[in-house]
Image: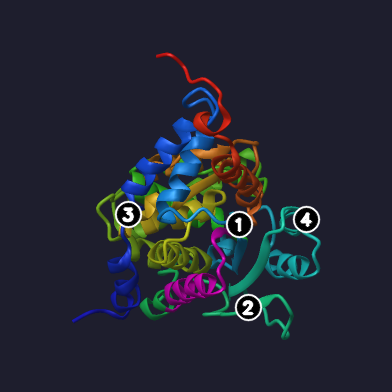
Amino acid sequence: MKTRIQSVIGNAVASIQPPGELWRTRARAHLDELTKPRGSLGMLEDIAAQIMAIRCGASSDLRKAVYIFAADHGIAAEGVSAYPSEVTRQMVNNFLANGAAINVLARLHHVKLTIVDIGVDADFDSLDGLLNHKVRKGTRNMLREAAMSKEELAQALSIGISLAAQAKARNETLLAVGEMGIGNTTAAAAITAILTGLRPSLVTGKGTGLSASAVEHKQRVIETVLQKHFGDFGSDTSADPLEVLRRIGGLEIAAMTGFILGAAQHHLPVVIDGFISTAAAAIAFAIAPQVRGYLFSGHQSEEPGHRVLLEYIGVKPILSLNMRLGEGTGAVLAMPIIESAMHLYNEMATFASSGVSEAKN
């Protein structure tokens, strides 16, 4: 008998097909015909070919949207963050007041911004711009018990999948995911250790700005968490990714996982942001490896685990700006580069149309 979680993700996972290689081949051929030395646009050519493969040859303008998933983490009670947990609520209010970095960047680059309360430990009034999909007020403390129940995980995954379907219905054609949640780098580091088999000391950074001694404490907490839930050292790379997510993840990570699976189901490209959203992408990849073809990495952050996860998934970051903010900022910064790649693809002349001579060999 199918579990509730399997029922929630089953249709999405079964529907995910890799991007069309025929369209990628055709896109590569077109790129080679443009008035430039072959391959001279470097990664921009890779981006354009991937977009064309995802969209099965559709080259119309991209409609950009970024979804920020917000939730609190019970593990914050263990002193793993430089900021108190109430900052999650305060930053959601800051997003809604257009005062955060993501607001500035989304406005500048004409990206529709949607804030999703998936598990903030606070009650919000009905506010414009905030989608209320609260599953519970933060995860449980994973040092003491599993972060989520199976039903809570199923709900968070379902919400993410549903929001991706709504994005498709609104004709949003280039999506980005970001997050807000004090304590979530601890969850991401724990997930990274399990998926890759690396020690927490190799994948745990300073998050929002911890001191060296506080980072060591954070690493010890993660070691204990992994031992509690997975035994011995705790790095069980064969562990069920959904159970990993349930035990040591976060509600926003679960919702982003569902969102990424849903986006791939609907042939929508997704730009992942930093360490947290990449942890969600890594879980989605572990569940359905074919999602990799729909992913773009906006940037590589300062968190050591982020590089590890990007290598695990097999995606290259578009930018590297020494950032560690989150909120979807790195993903939104990369969107104009993706747009630039597509404008070059669509608007450059070919050798044949321009009368420019091609290389002789």
Instruction: Tell me the CA gap for discs 4 and 3.
Output: 34 Å
Quadrant of res 216:
top right
Nearer-the-camera pick, 22 or 242: 22
Q: Residue furthest bottom?
A: 126
Looking at the image, tell me whether mark 1 or mark 3 is earlier in sequence order.
3
Instruction: Tell me the CA gap for discs 2 and 1.
Output: 29 Å
Mark 4 touches mark 3? (CB < 8 Å): no
Image position, residue 324 (x, y; %): 64, 45
Image position, residue 260 (x, y; %): 45, 62
- Circle 2 sits in a helix, a strand or a loop, which is it? strand
Residue in view at x 67 percent, y 52 percent: 82
- Give the label on residue 104, or none: 4
User: Counting other residues with Cα less than 10 Å from the Cα at mark 1, is it few (<14), some (14-19), or many (20 or more)?
Assistant: some
Residue in view at x 33 percent, y 76 percent: 5
Image position, residue 150 (x, y; %): 36, 77
Going by the numbered disc 4, the residue's amino acid type is: Val
- Give the label on residue 131, or none: 2
Task: Determine which residue is flagged by label 1.
Answer: 79
Name the front one of labels 2 and 3: 3
Image position, residue 182 (x, y; %): 62, 61
- Circle 3 sits in a helix, a strand or a loop, which is it? loop
Going by the numbered disc 2, the residue's amino acid type is: Leu
Name the front one of labels 4 and 3: 3
